[in-house]
Amino acid sequence: MLSQQLHPWPVILTILFLLLHQGHGARCGMKTPTVQQTQVGFGTPPEFTVVVQNSCPVCPAIDIHIKCGGFSQILADPRFLKVIKDDDCVVNGGLPLAPLQKISFNYTHQKLSMAPKSWYFQCE
Ligand SMILES: *[C@@H]1O[C@H](CO)[C@@H](O)[C@H](O)[C@H]1NC(C)=O
């Protein structure tokens, strides 16, 4: 009987946790992670440096996915950019980028457009 009365608490605590979690994420506002590409090699094919940055100054960002077009896994080390499927790549193996941390890698190919797709902010 007692355990039945206590039963709702895990659900309530989970909801509270999610609300608080989201509230903390709000400290990052609209700080979308940035993806910048700079051409560094001018041969055929050209070479690009990609820099992905967590632009939130207060919270780590985890599980950062970017739209990566037809990016092929042979172009980059999967620890930096892992191809999940067409137009879906994950940065840093899904592991956190600390506040303002950047990760960068190069690829040699015709330019492939890349843009932030999804991510989570993880705050204390
Ligand atoms: C990317 O290319 C630039 C220019 O060639 C070079 O300075 C840099 O070391 C390269 N970065 C990596 C991670 O290979």
Image: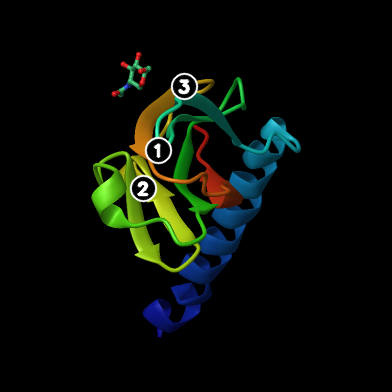
Q: Along the polypeptide, which appears first: circle 3 or circle 2?
A: 2
Q: Amino acid at mark 3?
A: Gln
- Does 62 appear above or below 98? below
Q: Along the polypeptide, which appears first: circle 3 or circle 1?
A: 1
At 50% from the left and 63% from the top, the residue drawn is 87
Which one is in front in this view, the residue at disc 3 or the one at disc 1? 1
Place of residue 8 in the rendered image (x, y in percent of width and height, measured from the top left) = 52, 75
Q: Amino acid at mark 2?
A: Gly
Report the Cα–Cα distance between label 3 and label 2.
14 Å
At 50% from the left and 54% from the top, the residue drawn is 68
Which numbered marker is on residue 44?
1
At 50% from the left and 39% from the top, the residue drawn is 122
Place of residue 93 in the rendered image (x, y in percent of width and height, measured from the top left) = 30, 46
Marks 3 & 1, CB-CB < 8 Å contact: no
Give the camera-side residue of 11 and 75: 75
Report the Cα–Cα distance between label 2 and label 1.
32 Å
Q: Which residue is mark 3?
A: 101
Q: Amino acid at mark 1?
A: Thr
Q: Which residue is mark 2?
A: 94
Q: How many marks?
A: 3
Give the camera-side residue of 97 and 68: 68
**Would the CB of label 2 be found within 8 Å of ligand 1?**
no
Residue 98 in view in this figure: no
Residue 115 in view in this figure: yes
Looking at the rendered structure, the secondary structure element under dot 2 is helix
Dot 1, crowdedness within 10 Å: few (<14), some or many (≥20)?
few
- Does 51 appear above or below 3? above
Q: Along the polypeptide, which appears first: circle 2 or circle 1?
A: 1
In this rendering, position of residue 58 left or right of residue 75: right
